[in-house]
Image (cartoon, grey):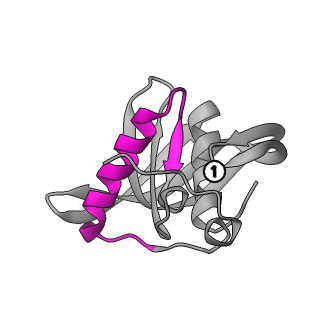
């Protein structure tokens, strides 16, 4: 189901609760909503009004992914960049890392399975943006 985007700073600033396997319908709503927005690259659950650590994103090959409880363990090569956000009007300067190791969970057969992934470039940047959303950090 496509949901409305939320711009309420109080909700967007609230750290998210861990997502569970029972949030599979929410994951589908996130995918549906992201796919409905032209040029959208990523979306967090709190951007559609649910304070859960659940995100979706498109990698550099335009494939969609669902990520439960994302985190970043190691980051290399910091750089400054300017980012926009679907739920914020202005662009902001932020520090990101060109290469990072991410931890997350993936839903497989109705169970959350721990995963680890090394990402670079664009994918690393948008995952960091989404982790900030899950922490309630606004750019």
Task: Give coordinates of residue 133: x percent, y percent.
Answer: 61, 59
Residue 33 to residue 72: above or below = above
Residue 22, magenta (yes or no): yes
Front in this rendered view, residue 85 or 65: 85
Residue 12, magenta (yes or no): no
> At 71% from the left edge and 49% from the top edge, which residue is drawn?
88
Query: Residue 98's quadrant in the figure?
Result: top right
> At 37% from the left edge and 46% from the top edge, which residue is drawn?
2
**Is residue 58 shown left or right of residue 90?**
left
Front in this rendered view, residue 128 or 39: 39
Task: Give coordinates of residue 84: x percent, y percent.
Answer: 72, 40
Residue marked by disc 1: 128
Label tally: 1
> At 20% from the left edge and 65% from the top edge, which residue is drawn?
111
Residue 44 to residue 23: above or below = above
Residue stretch rendered in magenta on the structure: 18-43
Point out the residue furthest to the top here. Answer: 61
Q: Residues within 10 Å of mark 1 (few under 14, many from 20)?
A: many
> At 30% from the left edge and 50% from the top edge, which residue is drawn?
28
Q: Quadrant of the C terminus?
A: bottom right
Assign the magenta stretch its main secondary structure.
helix
Residue 32 to residue 55: above or below = above
């Amino acid at each position: 189901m496509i949901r409305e985007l939320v711009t309420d700073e109080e909700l967007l600033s609230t750290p998210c609760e861990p997502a569970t396997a029972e949030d599979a319908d929410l994951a589908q709503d996130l995918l549906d909503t992201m796919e409905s927005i032209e040029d959208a690259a990523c979306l967090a659950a709190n951007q559609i009004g649910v304070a859960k650590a659940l995100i979706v994103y498109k990698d550099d090959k335009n494939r969609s992914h669902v990520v439960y409880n994302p985190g970043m363990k190691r980051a290399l090569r910091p750089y400054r960049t300017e980012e926009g956000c679907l739920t914020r009007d202005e662009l902001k300067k932020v520090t990101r890392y060109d290469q990072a190791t991410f931890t997350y969970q993936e839903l497989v057969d109705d169970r959350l399975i721990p995963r680890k992934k090394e990402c670079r470039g664009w994918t690393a940047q948008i995952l960091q943006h989404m982790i900030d959303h899950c922490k309630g950090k606004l750019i």
